Image (cartoon, rainbow, N blue to C red):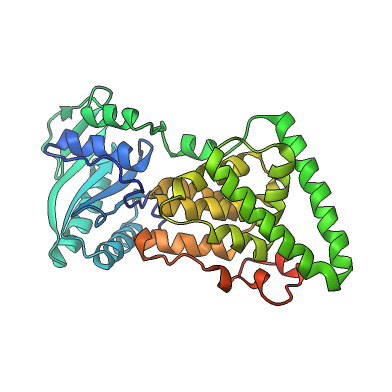
């Protein structure tokens, strides 16, 4: 089993509100604030350190012993890679035995590497319980009135009911718009195909389109207005071609990542299925840079549902699973983009991601 760490996250830019947890209820209130949804049947690991030095992760809670070991392994790898010194473990389940087994296994591994475990809780139906369970009915908690919840609302962040609701937020609901965008994308793809028939001019055409792509992305980030169907279709097709997709990739950095999340999420919601891998991977990358691991995983899922071998999505999945801090990424320089260099065959965009 290779567990998916569905919610690995690091601080976003601009820096989010700082939560100082002093009680078990505070720890529980932190979870939806940093994950963006309320977990169910999950192992949640909260880590603590200086600003920018921690991460948080959510993994599906397994029952089988072998799978629980795999969960402990992947979380410990992330802990050691990030040199975590303090952590809390929350197990969201009504299965007392599974919580105890997973909790003891994970805590034991954390203690082996000298991580201070400040609390281990089982969370179920509005109550928290210590692990090991003491047989009591548990302690009730209320999130709606908690200060962390209020701060999250004040900051303008949406907390989804569960991970499925977060994933559903990437599915469009305007069928008329979807048809318009798909038609625009088809017309533009036909234009590219006709250019490719004259291979001598194909590189120049793609280079011109790459410059348009740069300008349109930068304009969209400045004005934040929704894209008309023509521009949306054009962007979707360009994001499906590796040379021009990488031009869009090079535009993303930590400072503007939140704006890129808005742009690529819009295109994922509006795009036809066959054009989703490119924009979904760009959304996943932007979400990682913005510190929203849960959204990044949902975008990866959308990509791999269409193209299971799309390598950019797998690359982002790898950095998420390892809890690689966004700050380590060095933004792609323009002189590293082949489309602005020598000849670039259009067929490069029709295969897997590079």
Q: Position of residue 91 (x, y in %)?
A: 26, 44
Q: Quadrant of the C terminus?
A: bottom right
Residue depicted at x 41% and y 63%: 319
Which one is nearer the viewer's eye here, 106 or 18? 18
Say which quarter of the image contains residue 175: top right
Side of 68 where 139 appears, left or right: left
Say which quarter of the image contains residue 20: top left
Query: Does any portion of residue 240 appear in the rendered image?
Result: no
Q: Quadrant of the N terminus?
A: bottom left
Q: Position of residue 23 (x, y in %)?
A: 12, 36
Which one is nearer the viewer's eye here, 92 or 51? 51
Hey, which residue is sitting farthest top in the picture?
A: 145
Residue depicted at x 77% and y 70%: 203
Which one is nearer the viewer's eye here, 156 or 293? 156
Q: Position of residue 132 (x, y in %)?
A: 14, 45
Residue depicted at x 36% and y 58%: 67
Question: Compared to 290, does 69 lie above or below?
Answer: below
Q: Position of residue 249 (x, y in %)?
A: 55, 59
Query: Does any portion of residue 258 appear in the rendered image?
Result: yes
Q: How many marks?
A: 0
Residue depicted at x 66% and y 70%: 340
Side of 345 where 19 appears, left or right: left
Say which quarter of the image contains residue 85: bottom left
Which one is nearer the viewer's eye here, 278 or 197? 197
Question: Compared to 347, does 223 lie above or below?
Answer: above
């Amino acid at each position: 089993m290779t567990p998916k760490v569905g919610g690995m996250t690091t601080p976003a830019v601009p820096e989010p509100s700082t939560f100082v947890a002093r009680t078990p209820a505070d720890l529980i209130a932190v979870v939806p604030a940093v994950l963006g949804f309320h977990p169910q049947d999950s192992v949640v690991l909260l880590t603590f350190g200086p600003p920018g030095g921690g991460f948080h992760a959510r993994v599906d809670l397994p029952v089988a012993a072998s799978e629980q070991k795999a969960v402990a392994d992947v979380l410990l790898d992330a802990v050691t890679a990030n040199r975590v010194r303090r952590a809390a473990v929350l197990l969201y389940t009504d299965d007392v035995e599974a919580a105890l087994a997973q909790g003891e296994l994970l805590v034991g591994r954390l203690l082996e590497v000298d991580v201070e475990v400040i609390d281990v809780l089982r969370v179920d139906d509005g109550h928290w319980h210590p692990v090991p369970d003491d047989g009591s009915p548990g302690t009730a908690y209320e999130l709606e009135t908690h200060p962390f919840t209020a701060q999250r609302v004040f900051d303008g962040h949406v907390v989804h009911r569960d991970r499925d609701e977060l994933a559903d937020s990437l599915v469009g609901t305007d069928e008329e718009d979807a048809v318009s965008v798909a038609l625009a994308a088809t017309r533009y793809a036909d234009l590219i195909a006709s250019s490719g028939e004259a291979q001598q001019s194909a590189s120049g055409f793609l280079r011109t389109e790459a410059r348009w792509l740069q300008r349109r992305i930068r304009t969209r980030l400045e004005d934040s207005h929704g894209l008309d169907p023509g521009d949306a279709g054009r962007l979707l097709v360009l994001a499906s071609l590796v040379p021009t997709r990488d031009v869009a990739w090079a535009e993303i950095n930590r400072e503007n990542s939140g704006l890129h999340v808005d742009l690529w999420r819009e295109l994922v919601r509006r795009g036809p299925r066959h054009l989703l891998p490119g924009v979904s991977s760009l959304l996943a990358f932007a979400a990682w840079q913005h510190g929203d691991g849960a959204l990044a995983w949902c975008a990866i899922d959308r990509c791999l549902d269409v193209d299971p071998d799309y390598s950019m999505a797998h690359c982002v999945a790898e950095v998420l699973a390892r809890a690689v801090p966004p700050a380590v990424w060095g933004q792609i320089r323009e002189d590293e983009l082949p489309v602005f260099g020598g000849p670039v065959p259009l067929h490069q965009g029709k295969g897997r991601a590079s």
